[in-house]
Amino acid sequence: MPSVQAGPEIERLIQLLSKLPGLGPRSARRAALALLKKREQLLEPLGTAMRDAAAAIKTCEVCGNLDTSSPCSLCNDPRRDAHVLCVVEDVADLWALERASVFRGKYHVLGGALSALDGITPEKLNMAPLIARVRDGVEEVILAMNATVEGQTTAHYLMDALAASTVKVTRLAHGVPVGGELDYLDEGTLSHAFKARRSL
Amino acid sequence: MPSVQAGPEIERLIQLLSKLPGLGPRSARRAALALLKKREQLLEPLGTAMRDAAAAIKTCEVCGNLDTSSPCSLCNDPRRDAHVLCVVEDVADLWALERASVFRGKYHVLGGALSALDGITPEKLNMAPLIARVRDGVEEVILAMNATVEGQTTAHYLMDALAASTVKVTRLAHGVPVGGELDYLDEGTLSHAFKARRSL
């Protein structure tokens, strides 16, 4: 049953919008309507922005980041320390770390995490180029995977894969997030925070 | 400060996506990334769907609905009763009523509700054509405004404007929504539901 009475063009727009993360069928309808009501201010500029982005954005052949150039601007930046490599699952994680401005080395984007359930094997991730990069003078690899089962499986796999080399492998600290209330934290986080407590 | 490190094309895409209802800055980033990662399956089809919709969709000159033709398919449908007119604030409300399949007459979309705060005066709404349509053989006008202050103000204004004509003016019933729990309902709704109680 069509959800609206306004022709296949709107149906198709709603259907595609509902595939975006964060938009369900109902909010995709609202978004489509907002687009159609603001044609000059929103629908046409967004269409143009999508075409521009599709034409301009490439996947960096070195690290897997998305940028207008390949190698990307982070790989090309001579001020960034090429001896430290931060491995992340996704470009979104790279963006999050860049927003926090905590890291001045280079990145490596895996493009996902190992998952037997979803059939994500090491071959499907950007892993072999990572091993090759590590051989090329890297001193430290920071495994910045998500603290999920898949992320930690991936981190363990990489730790094993890198064990043969002399590179130092580290991971992000677990603990109480800033602003977090103990009452709402899970046992795993509290246990990590306790074990890794620091003297003041 | 730019939120990502990947060129103005992505910034612009995120900025425009964040203007959609239901998407904030953070979810717009996630959506942009999803689009860029699924270029063939999502980004390009969505751009095409937007161009198609922008080219095909018109505002119906009779009722204010959005459709590929003007007059729209609802206005053109001879099976719909032209003697009953359902007045709604927005195209989304028309879609909602059509999904419920409760109404087989014609619609009139105001394009908003009266709001002194937002400067929405009767002249800014699709009201004068409604009065003209009512003169043209309509027997009943159903005021299906939202149950908000603005919606009810608009309904009162229309009731006054239509008082001079002989048309029957009705409004939707207020009451307990299906699936609603009394404990969570406001006093206004409960009061309406009580006063309009029906014998079994």
Image (cartoon, coloured by chain):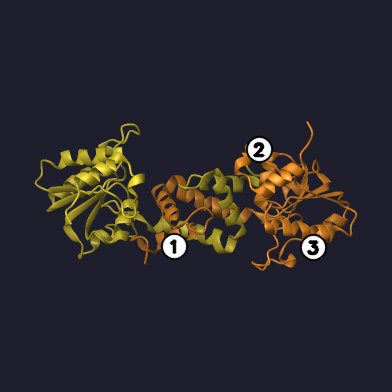
Chain colours: A yellow, B orange
Are both tags, 2 and 1, on one chain? Answer: yes
What residue is at 32 percent from the left and 47 percent from the top? A182
Point out the tag, 2 or 1, that comes first from the N-terminus: 1
Image coordinates for residue A112, horizontal then vertical, percent: 31, 43
Please state the horizontal and vertical placement of residue B183, each as a whole percent of the image: 60, 41
Vertically, is A153 above or below A178?
Answer: above
Q: Which mark is residue B192?
A: none
Residue in front for this viewpoint, B147 or B200: B200
Q: CA distance from mark 3 to mark 2?
A: 35 Å
Q: Which residue is mark 2?
A: B178
Mark 1 crowd level (few <14, some 14–19, many ≥20, 10 Å Cα): some
Figure quadrant of residue A194: top left
Amino acid at dot 2 = Val
Query: Marks 2 and 3: in contact by CB < 8 Å?
Result: no
Q: Quadrant of the C terminus of chain A?
A: bottom left
Q: Reading the chain from its start, which is encountered first: label 1 or label 3?
A: 1
Quick one: SS at disc 2?
loop
Q: Chain of mark 3?
A: B
Q: CA distance from mark 1 to mark 3?
A: 39 Å
Q: Position of residue B188 (x, y in %)?
A: 69, 49
